[in-house]
Image: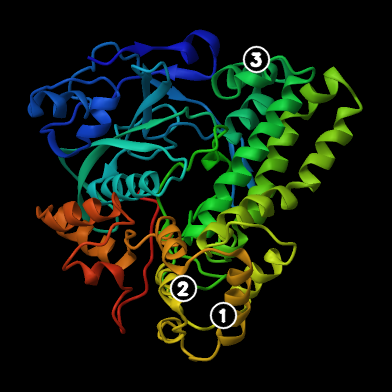
Amino acid sequence: MLHFDHSLARDLDGFFVPWQAARPPAPRMIAWNAPLAEALGLGEADPEQLARWFSGAEDLPGSQPLALAYAGHQFGHFNPQLGDGRALLLGEVLMPGGARLDLQFKGSGPTPFSRQADGKCALGPALREYLISEAMAALGVPTTRSLAVVATGEGLWREQPHPGAVLTRIAASHLRVGTFEWAAAHKGREAVEQLTDYALKRHFPDRQEAHNRPLALLDAVCEAQAALVAQWMNLGFVHGVMNTDNVTISGETIDYGPCAFLDAYADDKVFSSIDRGGRYAFGQQPLVCRWNLYRLASALIEAIVAVDEADNEVARQMLEAFPERFEAHWLMGLRAKLGLRSSEPEDMSLGRGLFTALDGQQADFTRLFRALSASLGGDYGVVAAELTEREALWPWWNAWRNRVERDGGDPASRAAAMDAVNPLYIPRNHLTDAALSAAEQGDMAPFERLLDLASHPFTPREGMEAYERGAPDGSPAHVTYCGT
């Protein structure tokens, strides 16, 4: 059995409502993450029993379900009362190694925060989160993970009928920027200080003794989010809805609704059906991240200046310096993608120059970096084959080759190092759509195949070449939805 603890319930009274999941009529296990279950300390169990536990049909022993309160800026507009409208925190699992991880249902029915919605989740969005969160974990990106998807045996209407499901996910915690916004808006400074102490103890214990703890938390979250979004940008990942209620204090990626990986590179690419203005486009993500951190600072500022008025200016300078912090993480990751082991002052210009040259070239983001490693022997043709205009990258490629020569080392070891950080397999959008459609019709084989490849993204598989390519010409545009 899982070893549960409930520190949030003990330490943050008033930040949640005790609640129970809806009882589904006919739970059936669809996807079970056996390696993750083993890591959590969950032993062997009957699949039917697991389906009952991880759908809410029966109470999971040791759990104490809670619906968490939070607020959020949604597309720039503040909503003071959001909360877990279709999710329940079951408790914190104490891992065999001592780590503490939240266990949460998603799609388990209405709560006091549902705002007239049904609180349910369709099978497709649940499997999307399972697939993409596990792919992100395999790529080394901080992320929530997925433990189970259980079909509930009921139908849902989402513009058309879909089977219902409950997703079980784990997270370092579900504390969000929106949690702090809610505390500041509804409870005031003392509650913000209480939440700050809990967040530091849980996520940044080395900063608990800081003179100004709220300021120390702001700095820690700035660092965590800068590192996270830099990884997104280096993988061509588009979150889709970077509202403040989707920004974790821990620095994990959360809420895989309108998300996707780039096929053809475009800075202004949007996949979400509701992002009509491009607020959360691929290239906007670092800017939005900083904007969200300003919202966190606004929630913390009364607690910050209560310790020291002068730290108002320190917080302002911290946020002003965020672009440099982000760029340092982004450039470190890009150097690895480009096979550079040393650093030179011109590397930032080299990196930016790559994406300037790619503008309008319809180059597949993921394939391009594999083409670069393949071109180390001097064959520009493998790079040219990825472009609309074959010579578009020629000047940049020559500059990169000169930089590589100054870096030293042999091409074979450099290519191997590049291929170890540049994935071959990602959950490509057309493949994901096809797999989810098949799953809703009862055929899990395409989903399981794509999950297996995305869980081992750097290792070539014989006969899997179709999974390395983007959508065929003439394919419909990929659009994602929030799943509610």
Q: Residue furthest top?
A: 10
Residue under label 1: 397
> Looking at the picture, which amino acid does disc 1 mark?
Trp
- Nearer to us of marks 3 and 2 is 2
| Whole-percent x, y for residue 199 in the image | 59, 22
Query: What's the residue at 60%, 19% (across, down)?
Result: 205
Tell me the element at label 1. Answer: helix
Along the horizontal axis of the image, is 93 left or right of 13?
left
- The CA distance from mark 3 to mark 2 is 50 Å
> Looking at the picture, which amino acid does disc 2 mark?
Leu
Residue under label 3: 194
| Whole-percent x, y for residue 257 in the image | 40, 50
Residue 480 seen: yes
Tell me, for residue 372, which label it has, or none: 2
Along the horizontal axis of the image, is 218 left or right of 382?
right
- The CA distance from mark 2 to mark 1 is 9 Å
Query: What's the residue at 66%, 71% (across, down)?
Result: 350
Quadrant in the rendering for residue 95: top left
Whether pointer 2 and pointer 1 mark residues with C-beta atoms closer than 8 Å, the reply is yes
**Colour scheme of this structure image?**
rainbow
| Whole-percent x, y for residue 180 in the image | 63, 29
- Nearer to us of marks 1 and 3 is 1
Rendered view: 44 above or below 361: above
- How crowded pointer 1 is (Cα within 10 Å; few <14, some 14-19, many 20+) is rated as some
Tell me the element at label 2. Answer: helix
Tell me, for residue 307, which label it has, or none: none
